[in-house]
């Protein structure tokens, strides 16, 4: 079975972090300010260059522990006697009391990612820096074959944020009912799995497995402490037309608007979207009944000034709500707007944009 591990890892991250990309293979080129190409079908990042004089800032991670695993993965620990055969690379002392951590995988293709996080590095004021270096980015896109019809091709862009780890490991099971173990001093081994404080340094003396594994460990070698941080996941900005899109996750051909009136409401809601493309105003209309959901006609990705007017139909007067998005593709990098509609006639009505909770 051929498994695209980075794509599976990324899809798992998207359950809680919708705009993250995974760095499954622990590519050190993945860093805030790195310019390159992301292929959505694989999630792979191809490094091209680094933004000149990039202003990079860091913030402490809210949690040191990073754990992303398939549902059939379990972890166990057991004390082992090392009898002084292992030297802790952080302290230089011989270790008697050790720890063995074991990951058990139920199925082929299951994965586990556990790390001790240090910080999040990010491009300060990303839109401003992208604008300042726009001509330079165009030149880089041209050199990489990612510039067509006077525009940067989607997928070319810049890493705006990266989660940086002290130590840890990515494991992918290549057969069912398999296991992978690391052994070392108690503190260092725990730090490999993120079970330690922020000052800990992960390492291991040896590894063993019951079968073949896709494995990427940091530090990459046993009996050493990593001297640099390793990126685990990142966020990426690309371009749609002339607009830089923070949190870009896929090639966009249009912006969809879903009207969700399935929340036990009874109102019929009429919707009208107006927007501008190349200086010309356009509009699109739809209607949805209580208990249903309706998708409006897609809005072009180069639309600006999108306004959505909603009318909850009453006996004599309609109750109206309005949303305004000056740059819809920049505000909805996944190309999807979902409006939740609430209200039981003849009571009060409410319209909420699902992603941000904004009320129209």
Image (tube, rainbow, N blue to C red):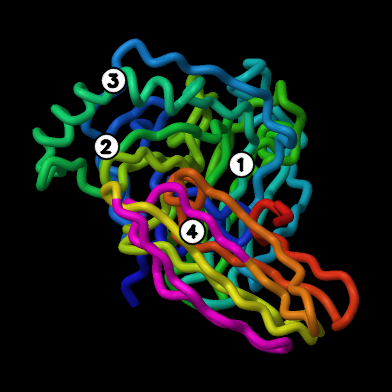
Q: Nearer the viewer, mark 4 or mark 1?
A: 4
Determine which residue is flagged by label 3. 133
The Cα–Cα distance between marks 1 and 3, rounded to whole angstroms, is: 34 Å
Q: Residue 228 placed where, x, y %?
A: 48, 21
Q: Nearer the viewer, mark 1 or mark 3?
A: 3
For mark 4, give the secondary structure.
Answer: helix
Determine which residue is flagged by label 1. 115
Alpha-carbon neighbours of circle 4 within 10 Å: few (<14), some, or many (≥20)? many
Q: Nearer the viewer, residue 257 or 62?
A: 257
Magenta span of residues: 280-309
Q: Earlier in the sequence, mark 1 or mark 3?
A: 1
The Cα–Cα distance between marks 4 and 1, rounded to whole angstroms, is: 14 Å
**Relative to 265, residue 225 above or below:** above
Q: Residue 153 placed where, x, y %?
A: 21, 47
Alpha-carbon neighbours of circle 3 within 10 Å: few (<14), some, or many (≥20)? some
The single residue placed furthest to the front in the displayed view is 316
Q: Is residue 286 magenta?
A: yes
Q: Is residue 294 magenta?
A: yes
Q: Residue 355 placed where, x, y %?
A: 64, 56
Q: Nearer the viewer, mark 1 or mark 2?
A: 2
């Amino acid at each position: 079975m051929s498994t695209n591990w980075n794509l599976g890892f990324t899809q798992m991250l998207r359950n809680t972090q919708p705009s993250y990309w995974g760095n499954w293979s622990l590519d050190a080129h993945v860093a805030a300010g790195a310019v390159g190409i992301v292929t959505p079908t694989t999630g792979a990042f191809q490094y091209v260059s680094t933004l000149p004089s990039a202003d990079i800032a860091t913030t402490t991670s809210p949690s040191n522990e990073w754990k992303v695993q398939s549902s059939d993965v379990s972890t166990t620990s057991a004390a082992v006697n090392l009898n002084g055969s292992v030297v802790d690379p952080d302290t230089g002392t011989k270790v008697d009391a050790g720890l063995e951590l074991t990951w058990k995988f139920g199925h082929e293709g299951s994965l586990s990612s556990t790390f001790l996080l240090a910080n999040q590095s990010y491009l300060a004021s990303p839109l401003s820096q992208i604008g300042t270096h726009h001509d330079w980015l165009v030149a880089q896109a041209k050199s990489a074959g990612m510039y067509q019809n006077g525009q940067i091709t989607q997928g070319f862009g810049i890493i705006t944020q990266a989660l940086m780890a002290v130590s840890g490991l990515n494991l992918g099971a290549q057969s069912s009912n398999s296991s992978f173990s690391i052994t070392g001093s108690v503190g260092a081994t725990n730090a490999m799995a993120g079970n330690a404080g922020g000052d800990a340094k992960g390492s291991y003396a040896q590894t063993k497995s019951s079968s073949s594994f896709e494995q990427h460990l940091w530090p990459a070698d046993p009996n050493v402490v990593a001297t640099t941080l390793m990126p685990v996941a990142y966020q990426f900005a690309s371009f749609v037309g002339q607009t830089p899109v923070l949190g870009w996750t896929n090639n966009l051909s249009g912006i969809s608007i879903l009207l969700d009136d399935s929340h036990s409401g009874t109102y019929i809601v009429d919707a009208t979207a107006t927007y501008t493309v190349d200086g010309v105003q356009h509009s699109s209309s739809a209607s949805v009944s209580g208990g249903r959901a309706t998708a409006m006609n897609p809005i072009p990705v180069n639309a600006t000034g999108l306004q959505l007017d909603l009318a909850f139909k009453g006996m004599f007067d309609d109750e109206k709500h309005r949303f305004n998005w000056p740059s819809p593709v920049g505000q909805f990098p996944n190309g999807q707007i979902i409006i939740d509609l609430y209200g039981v006639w003849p009571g009060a009505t409410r319209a909420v944009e699902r992603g941000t909770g904004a009320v129209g």
